[in-house]
Image (cartoon, helix red, strand yellow):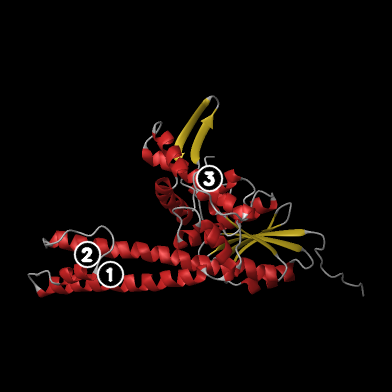
Amino acid sequence: MPKIKQLSFEGQTIFCGIDVHKKNWRVNIRNEDFELEDYSQDPCEKVLMNHLRKGYPGASYQVAYEAGFSGFGIERSLKKTGVNCIIINPADVPTSDKDKKRKNDKVDARKISRELSNGALQGIYVPTVEMEHARTLVRHRDRMVRDQTRCKNRIWHLLMFSGLKLDIDKPKQYWSRRFIETLRQIPCETQSLRYTLDIAIAGYLQIRKLLSQTTKQVWVLAEEKSFASIQKLLRSIPGIGKINAMIFMTELQDMRRFKTFDKLCSYAGIVPDTASSGESEKVKGITHRHNHYLRTAIVESSWVIIRKDPAMLMLYKRYCSKMVPNKAIIKIARHLLSRIRYVWTAQVEYEIGIVG
């Protein structure tokens, strides 16, 4: 009886594109020449690995999926098994007009595996677990700030819509106990309106309490050994406090991953979108591709630093002579980001009054 040779794909690479969803994954498998499989499976890394090892034993596997709700857990699980896995920005996957018009899970998974085999995909940066969880805390605080603003706006809308008047001026930012007590004492025509206003005030006080607790936890995190040294350097820059310093640290994480200053600006979103063709060149304004938390913090700090650093104020005035203030502050934000990069990489504190 002839001896049966064992199936082996040793020396070959199997490319796997996954369209990740909560209840199922669409998987497309191919080699360097053509597509091999396309199927749906349960959302589980072990199921995928068992299928690959059973169907293509001995091969090396490369897996890619789009960044989204599933986070970095799949990538970390697959790498523990020795699989080369990358997470990609969905906007960076080359897409034809036909794919856009006939988009579905099968098309998305096939597109990922095809471009992965062509070497056209570049993975995003995957943070350490510690840094990811620190970033989650800082980002959650930002969401709570926005929730607090929404609660305030709901109360103001209720007052205006119901014709309720206040005897004191509206506070610009912080709502004192006296002001909140004034809200509670506003006479309402019906019990229903009284109840609605009280609930809205209670909702605001609850989110304010949670925000205060979260802010204190961010401060505690900032004093930990892994953050303290960079925190001190960043806070030497006028306009950067504990919260914004933590935003810069948790969003940028490792300054060495940005090989050039232009790449750092691109990540932060302090670059223009352009549309050039032939001899025509069109600048569309500041790009829509950006890290929301990072760019917001940089622009916020830029408005402060021009009041505290004479050199930055001089630059701002120079830019304002050529453009509107909102565009000038973006120029200042670029200078500020450059200085953040310098103090971070050179490990030196900021010096006020230096032009350049």
Image-quadrant location for residue 224: bottom right
Give the mark count. 3
Residue closer to the observer: 229 or 133 = 229
Please indicate, yes or no, whether residue 307 appears anywhere in the rendered image.
yes
Mark 1 Cα within 10 Å, few/some/many (few <14, many 20+)? many
- Of the numbered discs 3 and 1, the one sitting upstream in the chain is 3
Image position, residue 57 (x, y; %): 77, 68
**What's under tag 1, amino acid-wise?**
Tyr
Name the residue beneath numbered marker 1.
Answer: 204
**Label 2 element class:** helix
- Whole-percent x and y of residue 235? 50, 58
Q: Nearer the viewer, mark 3 or mark 1?
A: 1
Q: Residue at 47% across / 41% down in the picture?
A: 311
Is residue 99 among what the camera can see? no
* Mark 1 in CB contact with mark 2 (< 8 angstroms): yes
Disc 1, SS:
helix
Q: Residue furthest top?
A: 279
Query: Residue at the spot x=46%, y=62% of the render?
Result: 242
State left or right for residue 44 relative to residue 288: right
The residue lying furthest to the left in this view is: 189
* Residue marked by disc 2: 155
Q: Position of residue 44 (x, y in %)?
A: 60, 72
Q: Which mark is residue 230?
A: none
Q: Which residue is mark 3?
A: 98
Q: Amino acid at mark 3?
A: Lys
- How crowded pointer 3 is (Cα within 10 Å; few <14, some 14-19, many 20+) is rated as few
Q: Are marks 3 and 1 in contact (CB under 8 Å)?
A: no
